Amino acid sequence: MSQNHQDSAWGKLQTMLPQWVHESKAYTEDGQVAAYIPELARAPQNVLGICLMDAAGDTVVGGDHDFRFTLQSISKVFTLILALMDRGEEVVFSKVGMEPTGDDFNSMLKLELVEPGIPFNPLINAGAIAISSLMAGSDPAAQTQRILQFFRDVADNPTLAINHAVHRSESDTAHRNRSLAYFLKDNGVLSGDVEDVLDVYFSHCSVEATCTDLARMALVLANNGVDPIRNLRLMPRRYVQIAKTFMITCGMYNASGEFAMNVGLPAKSGVSGGILTMVPGQYGIGVVGPALNRKGNSTAGVHLIGKLSQEFDWSLF
Ligand SMILES: NC(=O)CC[C@H](N)C(=O)O
Protein backbone atom coordinates (compact mmCIF):
# COMPACT_ATOMS: atom_id res chain seq x y z
CA MET A 1 0.00 0.00 0.00
CA SER A 2 1.50 3.32 -1.04
CA GLN A 3 1.77 6.48 0.97
CA ASN A 4 -1.00 7.96 -1.11
CA HIS A 5 -3.57 5.46 0.03
CA GLN A 6 -3.48 7.07 3.42
CA ASP A 7 -3.34 10.64 2.21
CA SER A 8 -6.58 12.48 2.28
CA ALA A 9 -6.62 13.72 -1.34
CA TRP A 10 -6.28 10.17 -2.68
CA GLY A 11 -8.99 8.92 -0.32
CA LYS A 12 -11.31 11.75 -1.33
CA LEU A 13 -10.61 10.98 -5.00
CA GLN A 14 -11.54 7.33 -4.52
CA THR A 15 -14.72 8.24 -2.71
CA MET A 16 -15.90 11.14 -4.85
CA LEU A 17 -14.74 10.31 -8.38
CA PRO A 18 -17.81 8.24 -9.38
CA GLN A 19 -20.10 11.15 -8.48
CA TRP A 20 -17.94 13.75 -10.24
CA VAL A 21 -17.75 11.59 -13.39
CA HIS A 22 -21.51 11.18 -13.29
CA GLU A 23 -22.03 14.96 -13.01
CA SER A 24 -19.57 15.76 -15.80
CA LYS A 25 -21.06 13.12 -18.08
CA ALA A 26 -24.06 15.39 -18.63
CA TYR A 27 -21.72 17.71 -20.55
CA THR A 28 -21.22 15.09 -23.27
CA GLU A 29 -24.60 16.31 -24.54
CA ASP A 30 -23.13 19.77 -25.22
CA GLY A 31 -20.49 18.53 -27.63
CA GLN A 32 -20.18 16.69 -30.92
CA VAL A 33 -18.00 13.79 -31.91
CA ALA A 34 -15.42 14.80 -34.56
CA ALA A 35 -16.65 13.77 -37.99
CA TYR A 36 -14.09 15.28 -40.35
CA ILE A 37 -12.12 12.02 -39.98
CA PRO A 38 -14.98 9.59 -40.83
CA GLU A 39 -13.69 6.75 -38.66
CA LEU A 40 -13.75 9.00 -35.54
CA ALA A 41 -17.47 9.69 -36.08
CA ARG A 42 -18.19 6.12 -34.95
CA ALA A 43 -17.27 6.97 -31.33
CA PRO A 44 -20.22 7.04 -28.91
CA GLN A 45 -21.32 10.51 -27.83
CA ASN A 46 -21.80 9.84 -24.12
CA VAL A 47 -18.49 8.23 -23.14
CA LEU A 48 -16.48 9.74 -20.30
CA GLY A 49 -13.55 7.99 -18.63
CA ILE A 50 -10.62 8.97 -16.44
CA CYS A 51 -7.50 7.48 -14.85
CA LEU A 52 -5.25 9.18 -12.29
CA MET A 53 -1.91 7.55 -11.47
CA ASP A 54 0.48 8.34 -8.64
CA ALA A 55 4.26 7.91 -8.52
CA ALA A 56 3.92 4.36 -7.19
CA GLY A 57 1.75 3.38 -10.16
CA ASP A 58 -1.42 3.16 -8.09
CA THR A 59 -4.50 4.29 -9.98
CA VAL A 60 -7.95 5.66 -9.38
CA VAL A 61 -10.25 5.17 -12.38
CA GLY A 62 -13.74 6.33 -13.19
CA GLY A 63 -16.41 6.02 -15.87
CA ASP A 64 -15.48 4.47 -19.23
CA HIS A 65 -11.78 4.22 -18.41
CA ASP A 66 -11.32 1.14 -20.63
CA PHE A 67 -12.55 2.98 -23.73
CA ARG A 68 -9.97 2.83 -26.53
CA PHE A 69 -9.26 5.90 -28.64
CA THR A 70 -6.50 7.27 -30.85
CA LEU A 71 -4.03 9.80 -29.47
CA GLN A 72 -4.53 12.31 -32.30
CA SER A 73 -3.00 15.63 -31.22
CA ILE A 74 -1.84 14.27 -27.86
CA SER A 75 0.86 12.46 -29.84
CA LYS A 76 2.31 15.86 -30.82
CA VAL A 77 3.72 16.40 -27.32
CA PHE A 78 5.82 13.26 -27.59
CA THR A 79 6.92 13.73 -31.21
CA LEU A 80 8.08 17.22 -30.19
CA ILE A 81 10.18 15.71 -27.39
CA LEU A 82 11.55 13.05 -29.75
CA ALA A 83 12.45 15.68 -32.37
CA LEU A 84 14.28 17.66 -29.67
CA MET A 85 16.13 14.50 -28.66
CA ASP A 86 17.00 13.67 -32.28
CA ARG A 87 17.86 17.15 -33.60
CA GLY A 88 18.29 19.56 -30.69
CA GLU A 89 16.63 22.89 -29.95
CA GLU A 90 18.31 24.90 -32.68
CA VAL A 91 17.04 22.75 -35.55
CA VAL A 92 13.55 22.31 -34.06
CA PHE A 93 13.06 26.03 -33.51
CA SER A 94 14.23 26.82 -37.02
CA LYS A 95 11.11 24.93 -38.19
CA VAL A 96 8.49 25.98 -35.62
CA GLY A 97 7.96 28.99 -33.37
CA MET A 98 7.13 29.34 -29.69
CA GLU A 99 3.89 31.30 -29.72
CA PRO A 100 0.15 30.51 -29.58
CA THR A 101 -1.85 31.44 -32.68
CA GLY A 102 -5.32 32.18 -31.31
CA ASP A 103 -6.57 30.40 -34.46
CA ASP A 104 -8.12 26.96 -34.95
CA PHE A 105 -5.72 24.00 -34.75
CA ASN A 106 -5.84 23.36 -38.48
CA SER A 107 -5.71 26.99 -39.61
CA MET A 108 -3.37 28.10 -42.36
CA LEU A 109 -4.05 31.80 -41.94
CA LYS A 110 -0.81 32.90 -40.29
CA LEU A 111 1.43 30.72 -42.45
CA GLU A 112 0.94 33.16 -45.26
CA LEU A 113 0.46 36.31 -43.24
CA VAL A 114 3.45 36.22 -40.91
CA GLU A 115 7.07 35.98 -42.05
CA PRO A 116 9.06 33.71 -42.28
CA GLY A 117 6.14 31.33 -42.84
CA ILE A 118 7.01 28.74 -40.22
CA PRO A 119 4.21 27.36 -38.03
CA PHE A 120 3.70 29.37 -34.84
CA ASN A 121 4.15 26.36 -32.54
CA PRO A 122 4.60 22.56 -32.66
CA LEU A 123 1.13 21.71 -31.31
CA ILE A 124 -0.99 23.10 -34.15
CA ASN A 125 -1.30 20.78 -37.14
CA ALA A 126 1.13 22.71 -39.34
CA GLY A 127 3.75 22.69 -36.57
CA ALA A 128 3.29 19.01 -35.79
CA ILE A 129 3.62 18.11 -39.48
CA ALA A 130 6.90 20.07 -39.57
CA ILE A 131 8.02 18.16 -36.46
CA SER A 132 7.11 14.82 -38.09
CA SER A 133 9.62 15.62 -40.83
CA LEU A 134 12.43 15.79 -38.25
CA MET A 135 12.22 12.24 -36.94
CA ALA A 136 15.38 10.17 -37.22
CA GLY A 137 15.01 7.19 -39.58
CA SER A 138 15.83 6.34 -43.17
CA ASP A 139 12.26 6.14 -44.47
CA PRO A 140 8.69 6.76 -43.23
CA ALA A 141 8.35 3.17 -41.97
CA ALA A 142 11.52 3.47 -39.89
CA GLN A 143 10.49 6.90 -38.57
CA THR A 144 7.04 5.62 -37.63
CA GLN A 145 8.56 2.58 -35.93
CA ARG A 146 10.88 4.83 -33.94
CA ILE A 147 7.98 7.01 -32.77
CA LEU A 148 5.87 3.98 -31.85
CA GLN A 149 8.76 2.50 -29.87
CA PHE A 150 9.21 5.79 -28.00
CA PHE A 151 5.49 5.96 -27.16
CA ARG A 152 5.63 2.33 -25.95
CA ASP A 153 8.65 3.12 -23.77
CA VAL A 154 7.00 6.16 -22.22
CA ALA A 155 3.67 4.36 -21.66
CA ASP A 156 5.54 1.23 -20.51
CA ASN A 157 3.16 -0.65 -22.76
CA PRO A 158 4.67 -2.76 -25.57
CA THR A 159 1.22 -3.42 -27.01
CA LEU A 160 0.52 0.19 -28.10
CA ALA A 161 -0.25 0.03 -31.83
CA ILE A 162 -1.54 2.01 -34.76
CA ASN A 163 -5.27 1.79 -35.52
CA HIS A 164 -4.99 1.28 -39.27
CA ALA A 165 -8.64 2.02 -39.97
CA VAL A 166 -8.25 5.48 -38.39
CA HIS A 167 -4.95 6.02 -40.21
CA ARG A 168 -6.55 5.17 -43.56
CA SER A 169 -9.61 7.24 -42.84
CA GLU A 170 -7.54 10.31 -42.00
CA SER A 171 -5.20 9.83 -44.94
CA ASP A 172 -8.15 9.52 -47.35
CA THR A 173 -9.78 12.74 -46.14
CA ALA A 174 -6.90 14.96 -44.97
CA HIS A 175 -7.38 17.63 -47.61
CA ARG A 176 -6.62 20.46 -45.24
CA ASN A 177 -3.56 18.84 -43.64
CA ARG A 178 -2.34 18.00 -47.13
CA SER A 179 -2.66 21.61 -48.19
CA LEU A 180 -0.89 22.77 -45.02
CA ALA A 181 1.96 20.35 -45.73
CA TYR A 182 2.35 21.41 -49.37
CA PHE A 183 2.27 25.02 -48.26
CA LEU A 184 5.08 24.27 -45.77
CA LYS A 185 7.03 22.54 -48.52
CA ASP A 186 6.73 25.61 -50.69
CA ASN A 187 7.88 27.81 -47.80
CA GLY A 188 11.01 25.64 -47.45
CA VAL A 189 9.98 24.31 -44.02
CA LEU A 190 9.58 20.65 -45.02
CA SER A 191 12.40 18.69 -46.52
CA GLY A 192 11.71 15.34 -48.14
CA ASP A 193 8.60 13.97 -49.74
CA VAL A 194 5.39 15.62 -48.52
CA GLU A 195 3.31 12.43 -48.66
CA ASP A 196 5.97 10.57 -46.67
CA VAL A 197 5.92 13.23 -43.95
CA LEU A 198 2.12 13.14 -43.85
CA ASP A 199 2.16 9.37 -43.52
CA VAL A 200 4.39 9.65 -40.44
CA TYR A 201 2.06 12.33 -39.02
CA PHE A 202 -1.13 10.29 -39.63
CA SER A 203 0.59 7.25 -38.09
CA HIS A 204 1.45 8.89 -34.78
CA CYS A 205 -2.00 10.49 -34.58
CA SER A 206 -3.53 7.00 -35.02
CA VAL A 207 -1.80 5.26 -32.12
CA GLU A 208 -4.51 3.74 -29.97
CA ALA A 209 -4.52 4.02 -26.18
CA THR A 210 -6.65 4.07 -23.03
CA CYS A 211 -6.89 6.62 -20.22
CA THR A 212 -4.46 4.48 -18.24
CA ASP A 213 -1.86 4.75 -21.01
CA LEU A 214 -2.33 8.53 -21.04
CA ALA A 215 -1.98 8.74 -17.26
CA ARG A 216 1.20 6.64 -17.44
CA MET A 217 2.70 8.87 -20.14
CA ALA A 218 1.66 12.00 -18.24
CA LEU A 219 3.28 10.67 -15.07
CA VAL A 220 6.67 10.79 -16.83
CA LEU A 221 6.10 14.44 -17.77
CA ALA A 222 4.86 15.19 -14.25
CA ASN A 223 8.23 13.93 -13.01
CA ASN A 224 10.28 15.93 -15.51
CA GLY A 225 11.20 13.03 -17.76
CA VAL A 226 11.85 10.36 -15.15
CA ASP A 227 9.47 7.42 -14.89
CA PRO A 228 9.09 7.21 -11.10
CA ILE A 229 7.77 3.65 -11.26
CA ARG A 230 10.83 2.20 -12.99
CA ASN A 231 13.10 4.98 -11.68
CA LEU A 232 14.23 5.50 -15.27
CA ARG A 233 15.03 8.73 -17.13
CA LEU A 234 13.30 8.60 -20.51
CA MET A 235 13.87 12.15 -21.76
CA PRO A 236 15.94 15.20 -20.76
CA ARG A 237 14.41 17.55 -18.22
CA ARG A 238 14.88 20.58 -20.51
CA TYR A 239 12.78 19.02 -23.28
CA VAL A 240 9.99 18.18 -20.85
CA GLN A 241 10.09 21.78 -19.67
CA ILE A 242 9.68 22.94 -23.29
CA ALA A 243 6.81 20.48 -23.87
CA LYS A 244 4.97 21.49 -20.69
CA THR A 245 5.34 25.16 -21.49
CA PHE A 246 3.70 24.56 -24.87
CA MET A 247 0.98 22.53 -23.15
CA ILE A 248 0.12 25.52 -20.99
CA THR A 249 0.18 28.07 -23.82
CA CYS A 250 -1.11 25.98 -26.76
CA GLY A 251 -2.12 22.50 -25.51
CA MET A 252 -5.86 23.18 -25.62
CA TYR A 253 -5.53 25.15 -28.88
CA ASN A 254 -7.29 28.50 -28.87
CA ALA A 255 -8.98 27.62 -25.57
CA SER A 256 -5.61 27.39 -23.77
CA GLY A 257 -6.06 30.72 -21.99
CA GLU A 258 -9.47 29.73 -20.65
CA PHE A 259 -8.16 26.32 -19.58
CA ALA A 260 -5.14 27.91 -17.83
CA MET A 261 -7.53 30.26 -16.03
CA ASN A 262 -10.01 27.59 -14.91
CA VAL A 263 -7.76 24.55 -14.48
CA GLY A 264 -4.17 25.79 -14.42
CA LEU A 265 -2.41 22.54 -15.40
CA PRO A 266 -0.31 21.60 -18.46
CA ALA A 267 -2.60 19.64 -20.79
CA LYS A 268 -2.96 18.36 -24.34
CA SER A 269 -6.19 17.44 -26.06
CA GLY A 270 -6.93 15.46 -29.21
CA VAL A 271 -9.92 15.29 -31.56
CA SER A 272 -10.82 11.77 -30.53
CA GLY A 273 -11.65 13.29 -27.13
CA GLY A 274 -8.55 12.45 -25.13
CA ILE A 275 -6.91 14.86 -22.72
CA LEU A 276 -3.52 14.21 -21.15
CA THR A 277 -2.79 16.34 -18.10
CA MET A 278 -0.90 16.13 -14.84
CA VAL A 279 -0.39 17.50 -11.39
CA PRO A 280 3.35 18.21 -11.56
CA GLY A 281 5.35 16.06 -9.15
CA GLN A 282 2.25 14.09 -8.17
CA TYR A 283 -0.14 12.53 -10.67
CA GLY A 284 -0.44 11.65 -14.32
CA ILE A 285 -4.00 12.01 -15.59
CA GLY A 286 -5.73 10.65 -18.70
CA VAL A 287 -9.29 11.54 -19.65
CA VAL A 288 -11.48 10.64 -22.62
CA GLY A 289 -14.81 12.04 -23.74
CA PRO A 290 -15.29 12.02 -27.55
CA ALA A 291 -17.91 14.79 -27.65
CA LEU A 292 -16.02 18.00 -28.43
CA ASN A 293 -16.69 21.71 -28.19
CA ARG A 294 -16.21 24.00 -31.16
CA LYS A 295 -12.52 24.43 -30.40
CA GLY A 296 -11.90 20.68 -30.51
CA ASN A 297 -11.68 19.89 -26.78
CA SER A 298 -13.76 17.29 -24.90
CA THR A 299 -16.70 19.08 -23.27
CA ALA A 300 -17.15 16.60 -20.43
CA GLY A 301 -13.41 16.01 -20.09
CA VAL A 302 -12.68 19.71 -19.60
CA HIS A 303 -15.51 19.93 -17.08
CA LEU A 304 -14.24 16.96 -15.08
CA ILE A 305 -10.63 18.18 -14.95
CA GLY A 306 -11.89 21.63 -13.94
CA LYS A 307 -13.89 20.10 -11.10
CA LEU A 308 -10.87 18.12 -9.84
CA SER A 309 -8.56 21.13 -10.05
CA GLN A 310 -10.97 23.24 -8.01
CA GLU A 311 -11.60 20.53 -5.41
CA PHE A 312 -7.90 19.92 -4.81
CA ASP A 313 -6.58 23.43 -5.58
CA TRP A 314 -4.29 22.07 -8.29
CA SER A 315 -3.85 25.24 -10.34
CA LEU A 316 -0.20 26.19 -10.73
CA PHE A 317 -1.12 29.85 -10.66
N1 LIG B 1 -6.76 18.24 -32.95
C1 LIG B 1 -6.30 17.07 -33.34
O1 LIG B 1 -6.31 16.10 -32.60
C2 LIG B 1 -5.88 17.02 -34.76
C3 LIG B 1 -5.18 15.74 -35.14
C4 LIG B 1 -5.74 15.13 -36.40
N2 LIG B 1 -5.00 13.97 -36.74
C5 LIG B 1 -5.68 16.15 -37.52
O2 LIG B 1 -4.66 16.32 -38.09
O3 LIG B 1 -6.63 16.79 -37.84
Image: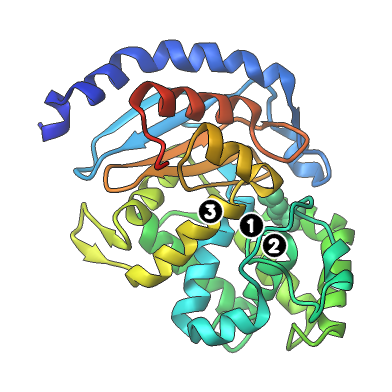
Marks 1 and 2 sit apart, C-alpha to C-alpha, by 5 Å
Number of the label disc, if any, that sits on residue 247: 3
Marks 3 and 2 sit apart, C-alpha to C-alpha, by 21 Å
Q: Secondary structure at mark 3?
A: helix
Instruction: Give the percent coordinates (x, y) of residue 293.
Output: 73, 32
Residue 246 appears anywhere in the view? yes
Left or right for 98, reference 125: left
Residue 297 in the image: above or below residue 270 = above
Number of the label disc, if any, that sits on residue 11: none
Q: What amino acid type should be assigned to the residue bearing mark 3?
A: Met
Foreground residue among 25 and 89? 89
Task: Tally the numbered discs.
Answer: 3
Instruction: Give the percent coordinates (x, y) of residue 69.
Output: 59, 41
Say which residue appears at 22% left-offset and 19% top-offset: 11
The image quadrant of residue 191 is bottom right
Q: What amino acid type should be assigned to the residue bearing mark 2?
A: Phe
Foreground residue among 261 and 128? 261
Q: Which residue is mark 2?
A: 202
Query: Quadrant location of the N terminus?
Result: top left
Callout 3: CB less than 8 Å from ligand 1: no
Callout 2: CB less than 8 Å from ligand 1: yes
Residue 162 in the image: above or below residue 302 = below
Cβ atoms under marks 1 and 2 closer than 8 Å: yes
- Residue most extreme to the front: 317
Residue 12 in the image: above or below residue 275 = above
Label 3 vs 1, first from the N-terminus: 1
Q: Which residue is mark 1?
A: 205
Label 3 vs 2, first from the N-terminus: 2
Say which residue appears at 58% left-offset and 61% top-offset: 76
Instruction: Give the percent coordinates (x, y) of residue 294.
Output: 78, 35
